[in-house]
């Protein structure tokens, strides 16, 4: 369902998100990733963050589940963006960091433990995962997209127990897109 939304509205979504200032969460994430390390942008959307990481000298791989977003992100970043889903993650100990900004929130809550295990497996020892969700308790559909909201308590009770990931930082922040400051996000950094 969410994939079809992004395919139909790819140009508008790209325009709405490509310039969003994610500098603060990126810096918090990169503080835990070695210089020139390997980063996976998981559910990369416009490719905004993949491009930022590549410009900083990191080795970047990225994927998205929407064919139209893959097309736009590939063109914008100049990187070979893969067409795949979280369920298709197959790497073992490959990435120093995984960036899942506003992407895991489209997975059904009961799929998150299995996805968490796949993400953990793809991290090197000491590697970190950044994830952000809309802050809240519900699973819902809005405008043709599925959302799984998250609180710190739910993250600790439902996401982390499926893994041996250690929660090293968690914070709540307003949406950085213009006109969206009333929307609140849960941000988390976890280490393998």
Image (cartoon, rainbow, N blue to C red):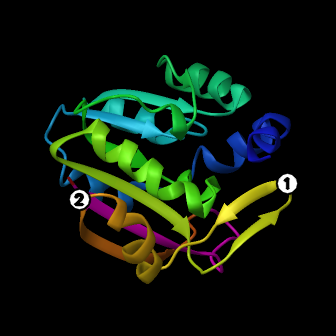
Magenta segment range?
177-191
Query: Which label lies toward us, 1 or 2?
Result: 2
Q: Is residue 118 above or below residue 91?
A: below
Q: Earlier in the sequence, mark 1 or mark 2?
A: 1
Given contact means CB atoms under 8 Å apart, are the residues at marks 1 and 2 in contact?
no
- For marks 1 and 2, give the CA distance: 34 Å
Secondary structure of the residue carrying tag 2 is: loop
Residue at image point 18% right, 53% down: 32
Q: Is residue 78 above or below residue 152?
A: above
The image quarter in which residue 162 lies: bottom left
> What's the mark number on residue 164?
2
Query: Is 133 placed left or right of 68 in the picture?
Result: left
Q: Is residue 17 above or below residue 155?
A: above
Compare residues 112 and 33 and report the one nearer the observer: 112
The image quarter in which residue 169 lies: bottom left
Residue at image point 36% right, 55% down: 130
Residue 16 rendering spot, x and y as whole percentages:
70, 50
Residue 91 rendering spot, x and y as whole percentages:
33, 28
Does the magenta portion include 189?
yes
Residue behind mark 1 = 144
């Amino acid at each position: 369902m969410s994939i079809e939304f992004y395919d139909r509205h790819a140009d508008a979504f790209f325009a709405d998100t490509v310039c969003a200032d994610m500098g603060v969460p990126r810096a918090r994430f990169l503080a835990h990733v070695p210089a020139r390390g390997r980063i996976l942008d998981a559910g990369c959307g416009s490719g905004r963050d993949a491009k930022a990481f590549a410009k900083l000298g990191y080795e970047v791989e990225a994927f998205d589940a929407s064919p139209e977003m893959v097309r736009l992100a590939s063109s914008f970043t100049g990187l070979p963006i893969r067409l795949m889903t979280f369920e298709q993650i197959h790497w073992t100990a490959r990435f120093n960091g995984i960036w899942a900004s506003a992407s895991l929130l489209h997975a059904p809550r009961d799929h998150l433990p299995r996805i968490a295990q796949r993400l953990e497996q793809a991290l090197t020892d000491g590697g970190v995962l950044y994830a952000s969700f809309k802050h809240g308790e519900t699973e819902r559909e809005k405008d043709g997209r599925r959302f799984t909201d998250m609180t710190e308590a739910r993250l600790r009770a439902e996401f982390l127990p499926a893994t041996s990931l250690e929660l090293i930082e968690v914070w709540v922040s307003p949406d950085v897109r213009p006109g969206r400051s009333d929307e609140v996000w849960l941000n988390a950094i976890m280490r393998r």
